Amino acid sequence: MTLGLNSSWNCLRNYLTNRLQFSQSFCNMADGGKSFARRDRLLEIESKVRIWWDQSDVFVAKPGEKPPGDGEKFFGNFPFPYMNGYLHLGHAFSLSKVEFAAAYHRLRGANVLFPFGFHCTGMPIKAAADKLAREIQQFGNPPEFPSAVKEEVSQPSEQIDANAGSQPPPDKFKGKKSKVAAKTGTQLYQWEIMRSFGLSDEEISKFQDPYKWLTYFPPLAVEDLKVFGLGVDWRRSFVTTDINPYFDSFVRWQMRKLKAAGKIVKDKRYAIFSPLDGQPCADHDRASGEGVQPQEYTIIKMEVVPPFPAKLSSLEGRKVYLAAATLRPETMYGQTNAWVLPEGKYGAFEINETDVYVVTERAALNLAYQNYSRVPEKPTCLAELTGYDLIGLPLKSPLAQNEIIYTLPMLTILTDKGTGIVTSVPSDAPDDYMALHDLKAKPALREKFGVKDEWILPFEIIPIIDIPGFGDKPAEKVCTDLKIRSQNEKDKLAEAKRLTYLKGFTEGSMIVGEFKGQKVQDAKPKVRRKLLEAGEAIMYSEPEKKVMSRSGDECVVALTDQWYITYGESEWKELAKECLDNMNCYADETRHGFEHTLGWLNQWACSRSFGLGTRIPWDEQYLVESLSDSTIYMAYYTVVHFLQNGDMYGSDTSLIKPEQLSDSIWDYLFCGGPYPESSDIDPNLLSQMKREFDYWYPLDLRVSGKDLIQNHLTFSIYNHTAIMDKHHWPRGFRCNGHILLNAEKMSKSTGNFRTLRQAIEEFSADATRFALADAGDGVDDANFVFETANAAILRLTKEISWMEEVLAADAALRSGEPSTYADRVFENEINLAVKETEKHYQTYMFRDALKTGFYDLQAARDEYRFSCGAGGMNRALVMRFMDIQTRLITPICPHYGEHIWRELLKKEGFAIKAGWPVAEAPDDTLKSANKYLQDSIVLMRKLLQKQIMGSKKASKKGAPVQQLTEDKQLTGLIYVNETYDGWKEACLKILQSKFDSSTRKFAEDSEIMSALQTSEIGQATNFKQIQKQCMPFLRFKKDEAVKLGPQALELKLPFGEMKVLSENLDLIKRQLGLEHVEILSYQNEDACAKAGSLTAVLKQNPPSPGNPTAIFLTSS
């Protein structure tokens, strides 16, 4: 799934219609009386807070006076988004991760640098601008489009989009896949897309100039991100391409640096290629097929034996070959025939003056771009053919043991793979075996396709490979085993291939030919080499899967002569692995993704001839492609404000001119090179720039969507190791999954889509940030829920109102030091929230930080309010709660935090820099005691309701008991037994002796049972009866110990139950709605006697540590 604004041209019209309907319904709700006052209040607060921040330049980052120690600085960044549209929630989700991280580090007192740039390199903007120009030329200015045009439209995707969906082949790191959208109906023109941006017809025509896009969208993105509350030093913002002469100089230096180190070479290689664009089509130039690589085949030249049939008569005197593409040239010894698709469309294509290949048009186009066409890049078809025309052709095929084989019909050939011509090896291939079997066994099938008996009946299976477990006729055996009866049983045949194909290649041995006795995997390259050297085969490549360029054409594989970066080179790969080993990847799946990519990544074409960008400095006919100018630009952030003076285009007057930036300057700044004595730049200025880089580098965190592991992020690792010293290699990459909206994919066609601007208008910035934090943190897909964003509006505004009310009624608060049990518990919950939330922020688990720092803390506050009763809350504790909760939520909801900090708490400075709150270590015993208290109250309430109402469906809250008992008075007796005794004591002591606390494992059950049988209770006469009670108790306590540790096996709880319940007697009375409640010891016989007629019930349900028993007595 690709989430850019221009990423689904064919869906945009539906999207706009849905958005209009949404807006209308939104207005209707407002007209119907629904209030948006709470959201509007947040928007007002956010607007006010941004003014405070701007006035004080709170996000401007300046280096410290001395090199930073561990944790004293934080440099985080996000892959700059591509600027052919508005930012959307997909961008916002990924960038929120680094935003929250930066905000946490800023809050705790670190010096933070968070810069943000904009990517414009590549072909999408240029392609869209050219499309506009063509529409104006064809339809006028403004254009008058036809009402209905049928066209197939491809779906373009974002470049360097942290949430763009891309899927590599199965052996590459797994990500999402963008799709080709086939559209039939009214065409959506580029002009209409531009109108959707709110542009007038007069303005739209200006976008024929691709550089107009660069001046339009980046400023809008800055505006949206500022409203979002992004804590960016905007002095360091810039755009890419040669429109920015400073960044252009930086990229030229980077490319020269790589070339000088031998990392860039010129070579002829197979590459995915767009015929329409006339250049290689890299991942981010594609509308679909990201991650798809060239698939290499061997084409077997099967010569047609003259005389030729009528359809080929014009080719007499030339060499005509059926060109069959195979992945297994070593199996050619077993050929019995060739296959064609009867209904398939083929052509006889001119390769050179003498040779003609019969293949599909698609294969001919690929061949033409691989120098196999008389006219380069333009296949010449000498005769149009169908599969029927080819059936019965006699062939001479390389390595075939039969001198002549024939062309036969096969019904399952796919013409979008290979050449449409297939060699038949029925001993090895289940599909070939069944197709041959069908023709031999079914005379009617032969008659239908005009197959003569002599073309097929004399030809028997030729064993060529022996596979352990399958013998020398593996296809026949597996088809027999699976009871396959026809070539049309596709699922069974797929299973047959799964069982034999890989096993044959890895474990099979050749039993014929020159390489007899050798393993198949060893013989394969030798057979291929032999065929190529004899001129009996050629190498051929095509895309593994269908690839569509952003220009809308289907890509081919071309043999291109261009510049490549030598990723995968052994020594360089080892450096990249070393860098990765020392990086924090934050998730095993992310690390495995990098390791896998380093395993397969090879040379990467870094030059392009179409689009925007920087020219390759030594070969200026080419541009640097879009993934190659974005690998170490993080270093540029450290000095850009000196060069561009706050202007993102580098067009403002600066103390340094672009032409002054020689390679020696860049080497001095970033590579520890010698001071450039010949430079005329102010030495003090150069010194300040170098100091900035040395202070901020290396980058501490880079956040991105996981789909960029397979290219952009791995390229970044490679380039850092090639250009920079080890102490400047990146420290951490954190990758996230993609974002769903309300558990469904983002989709303009369904209206399930939001730009960042729309989300802020709908929910406010802080509620949007709140929902982004709540959406999820792992590498799996996260879920932005509108209901969560709306609930955040309510929660945040209600909390503001509560604080305002409490502060206004200050006299109602209890003065003095916290002293009650409720005070101690609440204070402990605050301490716990501080410690737990800090752990979550440190590991960048923001959903968990939101839970412990906001949800849980609010729940503790609400419990405290109720627990305090008439005595009221403690003033000092309430003020501490307001202070700490504000700090804990500020990285996620900074406007809200700032408002409370300044307007309500009347604090100096800014909440975003308030410092991480100080807290004592949480008291785990006190937390356990409070959980015991709250759980006990819930159980008592349920029991009371059940006793009074005679119902098993009592709710947790229950009804006031006074209403239920009418004129009867109820007394509650709560019995406590603080120590396990009797057979339970014996069981626990045995478990204690059989438990290894370090591993949390018990001895074998038989050993525990033996100890139980030899114990005092095991010798009792009623042991069999006791044993029935012991077994479930032992199982329960074992499970508890494994989960909680050895404390679960203690004979008593770590706190006094009687004391806890007695201290909270007033709370218990209020919760139960009773005036008379007593806390009694079960060990005291006089106390037990108070149960009166319910004594038997008490004895049947005795209390145990952690489980008090409540008895309720009524009297008139």
Image (cartoon, rainbow, N blue to C red):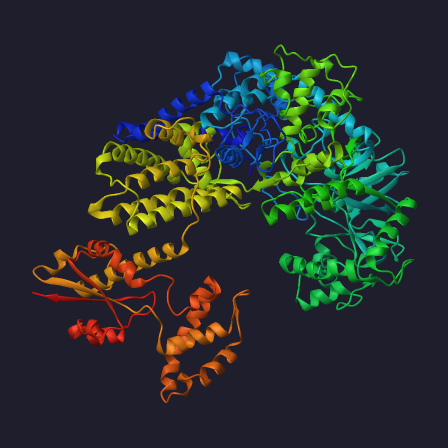
Q: Decide if residue 407 is on the left or right side of residue 72.
A: right
Q: Quadrant of the C terminus?
A: bottom left
In the figure, residue 494 lies in which quadrant?
Answer: bottom right
- Residue 951 occupies which quadrant of the picture? bottom left
Q: What is the total number of numbered labels drawn onto the structure image?
A: 0
Image position, residue 1057 (x, y; %): 31, 63
Mark yes or no: residue 609 visible.
no
**Along the viewing direction, whichever of 133 and 104 lies nearer the viewer:** 104
Q: Position of residue 353 (x, y in %)?
A: 89, 33
Q: Quadrant of the N terminus?
A: top right
The answer to which image quadrant residue 254 occupies is top right
Left or right of 531 in this view: 366: left
Above or below: residue 883 compared with residue 455:
above
Q: Is residue 471 above or below residue 556?
A: below
Which residue is pictured at 71% across the width and 13% down the height? 681
Query: What residue occupies the far bottom of the structure in this picture?
Result: 1021
Closer to us: 71 or 61: 71
Residue 232, position as x, y percentages in the image: 53, 26
Between residue 205 and residue 450, name the one nearer to us. 205
Q: Position of residue 425 (x, y in %)?
A: 79, 57
Q: Is residue 311 visible?
A: yes
Q: 462 or 607, which is in the foreground?
A: 607
